[in-house]
Image (cartoon, rainbow, N blue to C red):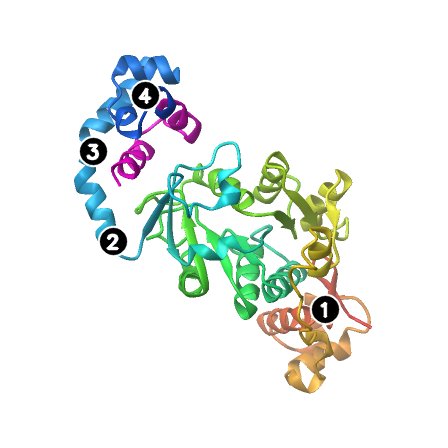
Amino acid sequence: MLARMYLWGLSLLPHLGSVTIRKLVQAMGSEAEAFHATREELQAYTGIGHTRVDAIVRARMELDLVSEWEKLYRHNNVKLITWLDRDYPVRLQHIYDPPPVLYYRGDLSCLQHPTIAIVGRRRASPRGIGWSKRLGRDLAAAGVTVVSGLALGIDTAAHEGSLETGRTAAVLGTGLDITYPKCNSKLARQIERSGVLISPFPPATPPLRGNFPARNRIISGLSMGVIVVEAGERSGALITATMAVEQNRDVYAIPGDPANQGAAGPNKLIQAGAHLIRGAQDVLDEMQLSSQLQLPLIPSESAKSHADFTGLAHELLECLGQPLDVDELVMITGLSVSEVNSTLLQLVLAGMVEELATGVFQRVS
């Protein structure tokens, strides 16, 4: 218990990353000795300069470790696991610089199952959202825990799809008492009930820009492979894919129309050697999970009767025998932009309409 407390204390001090903490503990002989290291020992064993050592010592003097430790354990909704614990996620333990401490809410044991990450852009197209939701749903139905980052767009769709049929894990770039974006608060509560919320950051940590690379590294580290659905050529999703390669994880990508900006990232990854996939079964086969997991025969949304859809959907389907954009559909049907967009999303998710290029749609024949 004391070793865990002192390791947690080290994780709260500034300028001490996971590699430095491990090095310091090994040099000092224990977590307690490392926490109480003198200025000279900190400099000798970490190579940190005078100014930063002074900041570490100052922060340590201001930290009432025992009191804060007890306060954390009174915070019933937040649990803590360290790399000293047997239940620390095995896959994460094997990356170069695993976080010494993880905070979580929910069932951490879902990470003992096969895990696959689904990532992509926040401003996703209906096509991308449809793919992400379908992949999440099919992978979770096959017994995979789907990992993502609770962001808008591709992440949200992956979590929502996987919750329909199984488990999901969300890695946050904030403390667990802060949901970012706030509009995903309901989704976060659903994930906590049917999976797990994870963060390397203590409670009350706001969504700072510098937090998200650390979050992305954990997403890939927890996963056996990473699927990129949509991403720009310079995006957080591609950073996650790069980290996955460095961590010896497989990378998969959904190809797209080169004219679509969201397809630039996945297409670039495929050119660089990522696996091109056409659905969840391709991932299961490539990772040799098909013999361990059985993908249930889920009735395809595209096989549903047209009668399952609204009159608006029928009206759009009649128009979409040829490629049309949203403005053209609004002009032809007299519907509002919001009605056209929401109905198109329903049809894309059902596999009955495809997005040929950004904002251009056609009925699937």
Which region is colored magenta?
Answer: 1-24
Residue pictured at 38% horizontal, 18% vertical: 46
Residue 217 seen in the figure: yes
* Quarter residue 362 falls in: bottom right
Q: Nearer the viewer, mark 1 or mark 3?
A: 3
The amino acid pointed to by label 1 is Glu
Residue pictured at 40% horizontal, 41% vertical: 208
Q: Secondary structure at mark 2?
A: loop
The amino acid pointed to by label 2 is His
Label 1–label 2 contact, CB within 8 A:
no
Q: Residues within 10 Å of mark 3 (few under 14, many from 20)?
A: some
> Which residue is label 4 attached to?
28
For the residues labelled 1 and 4, the Cα–Cα distance comes to 70 Å
Label of residue 63 in the image: 3
Using the image, determine if residue 296 lies above or below residue 172.
below
The amino acid pointed to by label 4 is Met
> Which residue is label 2 attached to?
75
Residue pictured at 26% horizontal, 15% vertical: 39
For the residues labelled 2 and 3, the Cα–Cα distance comes to 18 Å
**The C terminus appears in which quarter of the rendering?**
bottom right
Q: Residues within 10 Å of mark 1 (few under 14, many from 20)?
A: few
Label of residue 328 in the image: 1
Of the image marks 2 and 3, the number of the one nearer the N terminus: 3
Q: Nearer the viewer, residue 226 or 224?
A: 224
Q: Secondary structure at mark 3?
A: loop
The amino acid pointed to by label 3 is Leu
Of the image marks 3 and 4, the number of the one nearer the N terminus: 4
Of the image marks 1 and 3, the number of the one nearer the N terminus: 3
Q: Nearer the viewer, mark 1 or mark 2?
A: 2
Q: Secondary structure at mark 4?
A: helix
Q: Residues within 10 Å of mark 4 (few under 14, many from 20)?
A: some
Residue 48 seen in the figure: no
